[in-house]
Structures are given as C-alpha cells and as structure tokens.
Image (cartoon, rainbow, N blue to C red):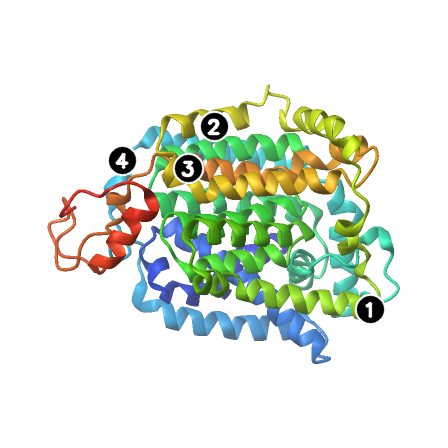
Amino acid sequence: MAFAAYLLLPLVGLAVWRVEAVRRLDLPARIAVAFAAGALITGAAMTILSIGGVQWSRTVLVGVLGGIAFIGVRASRPHWPGVSPGHDGRRAGRPAVAAGTAALLLLTIYGLLDARESCGDLHFFWGPKAVRFFREGGISLASMSERMNPGYPPLLPLIYAWSNTLARHFSWFAAVLSTALFLFGSVAIVRGTSRDDRGALLMAATLSYTFAVAFAAGGGEPPLVFFETLAIAAMTFIDAPVLAAMGLAGAAMLKIEGATFVIAVVIADLLIRRNIKRTLTIAGPAVVLLAAWLGFVKFNGLFELYRGAGMPVYFAALPATLATMAKAASYELWGLPWLVPIVLLALGNVRRALFPLLVAVLTFGAAIFFYIHLPDPTWWILSSAPRVLLTPLAALLIAAVAAWYSPAAHGVVPEGEKAEGSGREVRRHPRGVVDQVRRLQGDRLPEGS
C-alpha cells in the first residue's frame, strides 16, 4: 500500500493530458508528466489542508485527491488511448534499445530492493520529517531538530507523508523504491520529447549508474533530477512553457539546490531566447512558491540554510575544491559519465544544445561557488558532490541528445502542409513559429518537411 501511493500520483495529475504539448507525447512520457503533476497537486493539497487547520487522515486525503483524480480522468478521457494526435509511432522500432532500457530498469530495481543504493539523508531527515508530518496530521516544524533541516522545501516529505498516511506506516523500502519511478520517469520524458530512443538509453544507463554510485536512492536528488529533466526537455525539444513551469516549480519546492537551478534556467533562457516575458511566465510559479516558502521559514526563524551565499568566500580553497570535485565527479569510472556526452556534443550540432549546455555549466559553477564558502570543503564535497553534480550531469546528457535529435521528426511543419511520410495532414504550426525554431536551433529545416 505504501508504494501504491506513489503509483496513484499519475491519476491525481491526469488532467494535464488536456495540454496540447502533452497530447503529442507517447504514452510513457504522458504518464511521467502526469506523475509530476500529481506530485505537485498532492503537495499543494496537503499544504492547503494544513494551512486551513484540517488534519490529514486517510479519509480526508483519499477524498480530496480522489476527487481531483476523478475530475482529471473525466477531463482527459477524450485523449485516451495511448497514441496521441501528431505522435509518430514509427520511432518505436529498436527492440534492442528497448530491451537495454528494460534491463537497466530491472537492475536498478534490484539495487533498490536490497537497499544497496539507499541515501543516508533519507534516514536522517527526509524520512523522519515525513513521519513527523504524518503523526502531527499536517506540516509541523515547531521544535524540529536542526539535524532534520526544517528550512528545506517540503515537497518530498509531503509525498512521503502521503504514502505514510495511505499505508498508516512509513515504508523505508517504498521510499527507496520510488527512486525507480523518478529515474525512469526522467528517461520517459527525454524519450517522449526528443523521440530519440538511443539518447534515452544513454540517459538511463548514465543515471542508473551514477544514482547507484552516489547512493541517491530515497534522497532528494532523484525527484529533483526528474523535475529538472521535465523543465529542460520541455524548453529544449517541444517548447512547452506549461510543462517547463511545472518542472521549475517542482524543483524549487524539493531542495535548496532547486532554487539555484531555477536561476540557472532563467539566465540561460534570457541569454539564448531573449524573451523576458516568456522567461518570466515560465519561472513565475516557481518564484512565487519559493518566495512564499522563504517568507514562511524567515517568519519562523528557519532562514539560516539560505544564508550560505552570504558567507565569506575562500578563493584560496578553489584549487583543492576543483581537484576534489573532479575526484567526486569521476563516479569511480574515470569520468566516463561526463566524457561520453561531451564527445557526442562535439560531434553533433552544438547550437541546438546551447540551452541545456548552458544550464549544465551554470549549475556546475554554482556548486563550485557554494563549496568555496568553506576554507576546507573536502569532506563536504566528498559526501555531497556525487549527488549535487547529478543536476549538471542530467543537463549535459540532455544537451547531448539535443545535439543529435531531428527537429523534423517532431512534426514542426509549415501551416497547411503534410508531415513527411505521414500520409495525412496534422495540426500545423504557423510559418513564423517554424522560422523561429530554425533560428533558435541553428539548423534549417527542409522546406515542406
């Protein structure tokens, strides 16, 4: 029952299937997006109930979230079954690639079930905080131990508390196993938005391995990478501001590093697309949520964790910091998780990959910036960098996929024309949009394709 609570989250977010960008994805990607929406809705509903003084219980949460799921099912029913309008099923023709991804899934599940990959942070504060929320019947940070990081954003312990409430006990194995959902949700989103099976396999192999080496299972990094992947893929492959806003909002409410990611995305989008209104629209929900949370923690005297950027900077520690980060970033495999996507980038169309590449550089730089706030951050780097660097690594992997994906495969064709090989007319984008896509991607689409 505890793990089933996580499996029910896509039903809670099923209404997102009405969004045009989601309707054009394949079924696994649509389920992954609904999973993200369901997690956000569940966290928001539990927060609103807590603010309103309504104590959580199985009856209350099942009633509220079940009602939302019922509305979502009714709203999304016209968009069933699995093949969406404009989706080209021809790409699902690589059984070896699909088998490789499935094998990685099974191997990851095995590693999770025997607890070899579990994160210490799950046992120190993510899990205990969720248990406390469950026992209090709502968000309660009063007299919480500093070791439980009360100032951290609440989305992950809320999701864990939802599982706890539904099962009436906290399942550590269910929390660890939920990492598989976040990991392969990320892969499904990349596959569905890029329509690149081999790129998705690269991401599955890399993240499966690095999650295991970093002992990330059950911690904040797997869901953080999941929401970050949604935001980057939505802005890189399909230009879907609604989905990008969802990804940024989820990242901001998961970890402090999520706020850094939001800033990196805003800077990268402004530098590359130079559309302030569009960028603010995408980042707006995340900024509002983050501002509300910062106001809450400051009012309750929990603001210390966010003051790290104001601490003295020790530039003398920079050489040792870089050397130690390089050691952590090698992931015990000579840095291959980084070298492979870098080589693919160099051999592909780098201009198409500028946005995710810039996000990767900025988030990597942010990690360096925070580490040099200690005169000797060696222990801090060795204990956290393998997980912290998963964000720039995921962005780099998406950049590698972007350097090789085919814009024409996404059906972006001039208005009134037919997609090549489709044999039928599909929903068209205006000619101006096509021109804009060509300009942003640095690659001219064939006329009439």
Q: CA distance from mark 2 to mark 1?
A: 44 Å
Of residue 227 and residue 270, the one placed in the foreground of this image is 270
Nearer to us: label 3 or label 1: 1
| Whole-number angstrom distance, CA of label 2 to CA of label 3 | 16 Å
Report crowding for label 3: few under 14, some 14 to 19, many 20 or more residues within 10 A (C-alpha).
many
Report the disc number at residue 200.
3
Q: Nearer the viewer, mark 4 or mark 2?
A: 2
The residue pinned by badge 1 equals: 300
Residue 233 spot, x, y in % from top left: 43, 48
Residue 188 at x, y percent in the picture: 43, 45
Taking depth in this image into account, of 45 and 195 the one nearest to the observer is 195
The circle on residue 93 is 4
Tell me which amino acid carries mark 2: Ile
Q: Nearer the viewer, mark 4 or mark 1?
A: 1
Q: Is residue 34 above or below residue 315?
A: below
Q: Earlier in the sequence, mark 2 or mark 1?
A: 1
Q: Position of residue 379 (x, y in %)?
A: 80, 32
Alpha-carbon span between mark 3 and mark 4: 14 Å
Q: Which is in the foreground here, disc 2 or disc 1?
A: 2
Q: Is residue 250 left or right of residue 125?
A: left
**Three-letter code, disc 3:** Ala
Query: Could you tell me which secondary element the residue under label 1 belongs to?
Result: loop
Residue 363 location, quadrant: top right
Q: Are circles 2 and 3 on residues that touch, CB within 8 Å?
A: no
- Identify residue type, mark 4: Gly
Q: Residue at x 13, y 48 (%)?
A: 448
* Local SS, label 2: helix
Which residue is disc 2 drawn over? 342
The residue type indicated by label 1 comes to: Asn
